[in-house]
Amino acid sequence: AQSVTQLGSHVSVSEGALVLLRCNYSSSVPPYLFWYVQYPNQGLQLLLKYTTGATLVKGINGFEAEFKKSETSFHLTKPSAHMSDAAEYFCAVSGPQAAGNKLTFGGGTRVLVKP
Amino acid sequence: NAGVTQTPKFQVLKTGQSMTLQCAQDMNHEYMSWYRQDPGMGLRLIHYSVGAGITDQGEVPNGYNVSRSTTEDFPLRLLSAAPSQTSVYFCASSYLGVAFFGQGTRLTVV
């Protein structure tokens, strides 16, 4: 069984400040890890993914995440927040056999960007 | 370039009514899935399909049926709607570990 915990259902950051969204997972098999973003009234869009190899993963819109096996974490960061980053962010996990097809999601973190 | 198309976008049902949520994709992906999104719970997998003619249950399958007669279409059926099925429903198709989501169907059961 797999599970994902996102710390903080709401995060408020100032424009230009660091964005840090926390994600911890539980998995009995080597995980595939994902971050998705959802803008208002839209579906989810992939930001980045980790499957194997390099543990620091870069995604779209300046986001990156680091897979830390010892901490079972996959935190998402962006050095400088932009107003357009206001959205809800979801961390998700799947097993390698499912390869991102059967996703288990965290509860989501809504990001507010203050001018 | 349509991607994943869901219809309708909004629906209000009375308790006990039935309906079908439509999902179509034009990317020729073998893998398709249905999720429901509820506040604070993220998305939860309802049913999925690894190809035409093959479906299986996800985390929350009760009250929902699916079928997959073609690669393109993956409809979700509610046989007897209940207020607990009020939610936003997302269909997704996947390829090489990346899921592509539709715009969602917001369903209210009264």
Image (cartoon, rainbow, N blue to C red):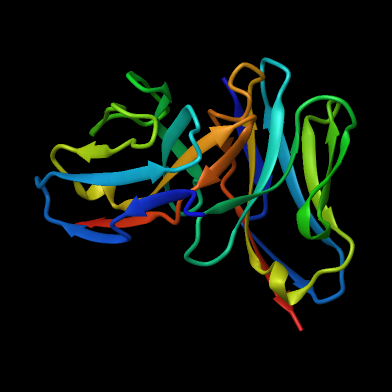
Residue B73 on image: x %, y %:
34, 37
Quadrant where the C terminus of chain A sits is bottom right
Q: Position of residue A19 (x, y in %)?
A: 81, 61
At 53% from the left and 28% from the top, the residue drawn is A102
Q: Judge whether residue B110 can be spotted in this image.
A: no
Q: Is residue A112 above or below residue A95?
A: below
Residue lying farthest bottom? A115
Q: Decide: is A73 above or below A80.
A: above
Residue A83 location in percent, x, y?
73, 76
In the displayed structure image, the side of residue A39 where residue B81 appears, left or right? left
Residue B65 lies in quadrant: top left
Observer-nearest residue: A104 or B6?
B6
Q: Is residue A12 above or below residue A99?
A: below
In screen coordinates, is B73 left or right of B82? Answer: right
Q: Is residue B11 visible?
A: yes
Q: Residue at x 80, y 76 (%)?
A: A14
Q: Quadrant of residue B81?
A: top left
Above or below — where is A72 with respect to A58?
Answer: above
List x then y, in percent, for residue A55.
88, 33
| Residue found at x 39% / y 30% | B71
State the residue in front, B102 or B71: B71
How many numbered dots are placed on residues in this image?
0
Quadrant including the N terminus of chain A: top right
Left/right placement of residue A10 relative to residue B63 reads: right
